[in-house]
Amino acid sequence: MEQFIGSHFIYTYENGWEYEFYIKNENTVDYRIHSGMVGGRWVRDQHANIVKLVEGVYKVTWTEPTGTDVALDFMPEQKRIHGVIFFPKWVHEHPEITVCFQNDHIALMEESRLKYETYPKYVVPEFADITFAKNEGANNEKVISQAPYEGMTEDIRSGKLSYS
C-alpha cells in the first residue's frame, strides 16, 4: 500500500469524462472533475475505503454527501482504471447543484439529497486510461488545493503546475 498512498492520477473514462484523483492517505482522497456531467466539482478530505486487492491492483470506494456511491479499481501498472459511479436520480437531473467545492456546501448536498428523488440510480460503469501518474507523497495539501480550470490537466501533465 505504501507505493499507492500519495499517488496522484489524471484519467479519462471511455465516455470522455476527465478526472483527477489523489490518494491522500490510507483512508482519505481528494479529487477534481475536469469534464463530464459534474465537470468543475472538486472535493477534499473525502473519507474512503482503500484496499489492495492483489499485487498492483487497488480498490477505492466511498459515499459522497450527495448520496453518490463510487467504486474505483486502479491498475497503475496497466495505466487503467475501472470505475462505477452510482449517481442518485437528483444528481443526474440537477448536476449543476454539485458543481462546486463540495466542502463549502455540505449542507446544500444533504438538503438536495432529501429534497429530490434518489431512485432510480444513474449507473455509469466505465474503463478509464490513466494519462498522468505521480506519487506526490502522503498528506500533500498542495495537490488538490484549488478549483479546476480549463487546461489544468495539461498544465499538470507538462509540469507547469507542480506539487513537489
Image (cartoon, rainbow, N blue to C red):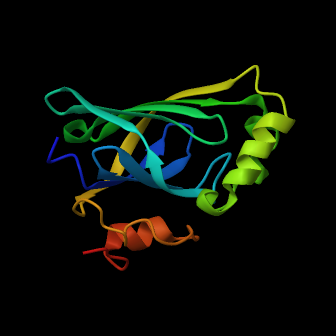
Q: Is residue 41 left or right of residue 81?
A: right
Residue 147: percent from left, percent from top? 57, 69
Residue 71: percent from left, percent from top? 45, 30
> Residue 95: in sight, yes or no?
yes
32 vs 17: above or below? below
Occupied quadrant, residue 117: top right
103 vs 19: above or below? below
Q: At x 44% / y 55%, what residue is drawn? A: 30
Residue at far right of view: 115
Occupied quadrant, residue 143: bottom left
Q: Is residue 61 left or right of residue 121?
A: left
> Residue 34: in sight, yes or no?
no
Quadrant where the C terminus sits is: bottom left
Residue 1: percent from left, percent from top? 17, 40
Occupied quadrant, residue 158: bottom left
Q: At x 57% / y 71%, what residue is drawn? A: 149
Q: At x 85% / y 34%, what residue is drawn? A: 116
